[in-house]
Image: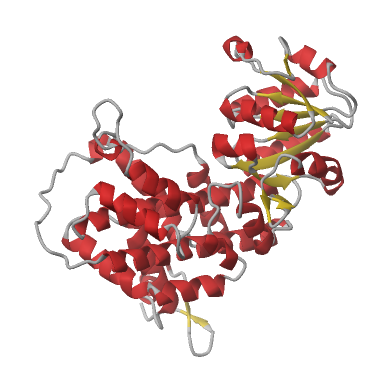
Amino acid sequence: MKLAIIGMGVMGRNLALNFRDAGHQCVTWDPWPQARNWSAEGIEVCDTLEALVNSLPVPSIVLLMVKSGRPVFELTEQLTGLLETGDVIIDGGNSNYLDTETNVVACREHGINFAGLGVSGGSEGARSGPSMMLGCAAEMRIMLEPMLANVAARHDGKPCLGWFGEGGAGHFVKMVHNGIEYAIMQAIAESWQLLELTGLTSFAAGRQLDIWSRGPLAGYLMEISGEVLQASDPLSETLLIDLVDDAAGQKGTGGWCISEAVNLGVPVPSIMAAVTMRQVSSHEVLRVLREHRPETDTGITAEAVHDALVCAVALALAQGAHLLTVASQEYDWKIQLAEAARVWRQGSILRMAMLDRFADPAALFDTASEHADGLRLSVAAASTAAVPVPVMSASLAYLDSCAADQLPTALVQLQRDRFGAHGLKHKGTGETFHGPW
């Protein structure tokens, strides 16, 4: 099969090489002339968008690997004037699922099919086999799946490619994947600073993460975290962790995940805390206070930190599973937790052993409860030492809230009724009433 790829950044180039090696013909183009200087054996680079489209068979398939937002909208509009009825545009970037829904409708008016494809695995995955989350009309699935399966990662002999429903379903699943990823990355980072409270150096903490990456926490993010904590600058031989600016970047998917969770009424406190920490890290105006950290022996142990991290990871997965379940029901999609876990199991940044429990949120809560003592000790130690651990703190509050007989929100309801006459629900009879004010 022959396809076109627009966008010759590292992801686009590596996917083109992957498709070529899988036996597909691939032509490429990029709006930036400098990017079109790239060349590779067996891959044609076109000088114009028109030449790219004219080189394709019918029906034509064009894969967009460009920045989300305006670039996708602009290219889609240009392509609708060049493609024919029945042709296909696939957006393989980190697009907002609502943008994908908009493009589906716009393309349909021209008789063109539009699909959203979440791609996880970074540049390495793009080259050797990514995890792919497809959203498109059911009839398009038959056309696209064989081609995409050729280049996807594989787990237990099956391609890590899943169809999750029409329209923006694929990009929604990728958005939640990234939200969970935010939370787990932050939780691992917090475990590093907690390990330093036990007396370990950053290098030794990296070695500890290496050990943990071969147990219940086994996964790609654990592996690379241990690796980077032990990495040194080749010129100064100083650990990179001591040289890097801590202002953390983000591309939007974490914030979109929070926004969608709020819209659907789904609590995702771990993801919220992770996004907030990235925001705080990047705002110098907020970081003017240099409080002296108390020098105190917190008594925290590496074992407690390990259990805290297991608990935080399990709860981040549980929150993501909850959001996917509610969204699938609300938007009439086909998102199955077992299928999402299978697709993420290889190729994706989120690949980890604990995904084997993703389809059973109750099992994730059991895992969290079994390790909750370590989380309590770790959050207490961090508070004593003035070390911020927002994801672990949010995880503990979430777990305790889920297990509480009565939450402080009972008083919130009284407050709301007092100033706004919003009404109260009697927990015995279920009847609505107002307070005597």
The number of numbered badges drawn on the structure is: 0
Residue 233 image-quadrant placement:
top left
What residue do we see at 72% from left, 54% from top? 157
Residue 250, percent from left and from top = 44, 38
Residue 36, percent from left and from top = 63, 13
Foreground: 34 or 174?
34
What residue do we see at 54% from left, 59% from top? 320
Q: Is residue 274 left or right of residue 338?
A: left
Q: Is residue 100 above or below residue 387?
A: above
What residue do we see at 78% from left, 13% from top? 50
> Can residue 29 be seen from the camera position used here?
yes
Q: Is residue 347 left or right of residue 103?
A: left
Residue 436, percent from left and from top = 37, 81
Position of the C terminus, as image quadrant, is: bottom left
> Can residue 419 be seen from the camera position used here?
no
Residue most toward the bottom? Answer: 428
Position of the N terminus, as image quadrant, is: top right
Q: Is residue 169 left or right of residue 360?
A: right
Residue 295 image-quadrant placement:
bottom left
Residue 364, percent from left and from top = 51, 70
Q: Is residue 210 above or below residue 167?
A: below
Say how the picture is coloured: secondary structure
Q: Is residue 350 above or below residue 128?
A: below
Foreground: 221 or 415?
221
What residue do we see at 62% from left, 34% from top? 127
